[in-house]
Amino acid sequence: MGRAETLKALRADAAAARMAGLTLPQGAAWANAARQEALARVGAMGLPTKRDEYWKYTDPATLTAGEAADAALFTPDERPMFDGTDRLRIVFVDGVFAPEMSDDMTGENLEIERLSTAMAKDIHWAKDLYGKLETEGHDPVERPLAALNSAFATDGVVIRATGKVSRPVNVSYLHRAIRSDAILHHVIRVDEGADLTFLENGPAASRLSKVMEVDVADGGAFHHVRTQGRDHERRAVTGSYARLGAGSTYKSFTLTVNGRLTRNETIITITGDEAVAHVAGACVGDGKDFHHDDTVFITHDAVACESRQVFKKVLRNGATGVFQGKILVKPGAQKTDGYQISQSLLLDDDSQFLAKPELEIYADDVACSHGSTSGAIDETGLFYLRSRGVPEKEAIDLLTLAFLAEALAEIEDEALAEDLRERLESWLKRHR
Amino acid sequence: MLTIKNLHAELEEEGKKILKGVDLVLEPGKVHAIMGPNGSGKSTLSYILAGREGYEVTEGSADLDGADLLEMEPEERAAAGLFLAFQYPVEIPGVGNMTFLRTAVNAQRKARGEEELSAGDFLKDVRAKAKTLKIDADMLKRPVNVGFSGGEKKRNEILQMAMLEPKMCILDETDSGLDVDAMKLVSEGVNALRDGKRSFLVITHYQRLLDHIKPDIVHIMADGRIIKTGGPELALEVENNGYADILAEEGI
């Protein structure tokens, strides 16, 4: 067998292993068809192996294994995330909707229901989106784990913002079973000129697969803040697929602390002129079992659009961080303003940061820049702080927070940014 | 207050000898100045006293009120009352000046077993002290020393000194990069802290700073040692004749 055939066989094996214990949920005809199509995509692509170029730095084996691995429960003694924000809260426990913990699904300028409810309805607007953005996201790089999610997702939320939604929607993912395997899928549509804030928090399960498809119509705005819990052993693969109309905005921030394996993919296609896409992340990892991967692909297919990627990782005790970020500027996407920065702060010699920043530009009137750095704590700054009486560990925390500040500054809501900063500070303090 | 005996030190990596037997005794409430040509070891002495890495003390001792400075971490020396105003204050992007000051003040109080300052008391104190140094609210908000002019950085050092209230202040070429007005402002800040108990070690190339901060004793340092000690008139002698005569006199 040649290399290509070998790879294909390995992918097919991985897909077979992963799907052995799964059954396709049943719903309305359109939903069943969408799932069958997704299943066919998985069949054609197989599932990734570590020999795939796109998974070179992150071994997907535990994500494609038939069984999820155990993950010890972690119950932090602290205020619930986002508790300072008046929000509509929807709770999933190990991937299962928890009605007793969730708010009524109603709100001004808001249509919201569970995915399982929507997919049981004969006619639903989600038909035009479910699995569609995911499908488009395979070009030019295949993302079969997302297709697997579209085929087998058991639940999620379907949200349509028809105007300015005053109360943010908050999906909380609780992890209560040592072994749980959650597959969740959200479909979000922000109508023309509408505005939605979507908050996510929690580890979700011992293994989570989550896909979010977001369609932002002309002039719409989507704001996303996510924290991924603090469970040390959980694994997660998430994919955010977005399509942006003219003059629309998509701003997303993710905070990741702990977790054994995280692969967060963001695939954004800007199809309307003068749209803005910002994706940012801050991550803190401790220990050789920590592996965090941010993979971002932003396609500019319109004029005068802006995109921005800001990712910061703090790694210590042998932790691994990965960043694969791409800006693709299609022919005719003139006046594109693209920015990408990925940086790591390595607190010891054992930790590593693997970065693959890419620009691919087919228009001649664009401004794109990217940078990627790895560095240790600034010794001069550390001595300066210590000479003022700040103990070494506290000084390192202060410099660590300062390093993450640029990513946290991407959060638009200042109160929320300050809340996350304070939590980070206390986590860093308790960690030592 | 500060007692330095026969202090020898070298650069850790290169093994290059920098201090070759420094002896210095500073009494409480006194202002001593150290002058000397470039490369004489003045700044190294200040770094070694503050605990900067990269130097190895091969001989001698340095005590602050009987406590062995050389055995202490930099933060412990600070809590014990030692303060170094840096020649080149360090920029720390991402850390607000106010946060930095409050963290430092409270860390030292904690180390001394004192209660942390309440946010209100701290704010009142810092605003009053900042005002006398002409440090505006914006400078307090900005990241530590980032985008500060040379004069602003030095004023910020003096503000830290005023907030931390050390008993032993070392000023390393605080006059470098200052224009006349800034030097006056900084000197006034320092003089305001002279209370008869607090001691100062002022390291400088030039006599002009000593017009503003009047020393009790002047030392001349060369080739890693104090080669001559005298009154304020020694600084004037250097100003008029340069170091050449003194160095020749001492056979250097």
Image (cartoon, helix red, strand yellow):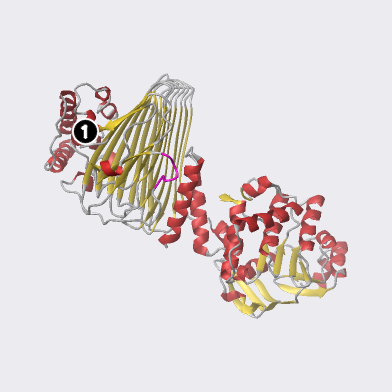
Residue B77 image offset from top left, x and y in percent: 61, 70
Residue A322 image offset from top left, x and y in percent: 36, 45
Is residue B201 at least partly visible in the picture? Answer: yes
Main SS class of the magenta portion in the image: loop
Image vertical order of residue B136 relative to residue B105, above or below: above
Give whichever of B139, A107 is nearer the camera.
Answer: A107
Q: Name the quadrant of the C terminus of chain B.
A: bottom right
Residue A33 image offset from top left, x and y in percent: 16, 25
Helix, strand or loop at label 1? It is: helix
Image vertical order of residue B230 relative to residue B213, above or below: below
Residue A246 image offset from top left, x and y in percent: 43, 20
Which segment is the magenta one?
A81-86
Residue A298 quadrant: top left
Q: Residue at x 65, y 81 (%)?
A: B66
Give whichever of B234, A95 is nearer the camera.
Answer: A95
Give whichever of B172, A116 is nearer the camera.
Answer: A116
- Which residue of the protein is positioned furthest toward the top in this rendering? A332
Image vertical order of residue B228 relative to residue B179, above or below: below
Give whichever of B245, B72 is nearer the camera.
Answer: B72
Q: Name the quadrant of the N terminus of chain B.
A: bottom right
Q: Position of A93 compared to A301: left or right? A: left
Q: Which residue is mark 1?
A: A116
Q: Position of B143 compared to A255: left or right? A: right
Chain to which the residue tagged by mark 1 belongs: A
Is residue A53 at least partly visible in the picture? Answer: no
* Magenta stretch contains residue B217: no
* Mark 1 surroundings: few (<14), some (14-19) or many (≥20) residues within 10 A: many
Q: Residue at x 27, y 48 (%)?
A: A235
* Identity, as a three-letter code, of the amino acid under mark 1: Ser
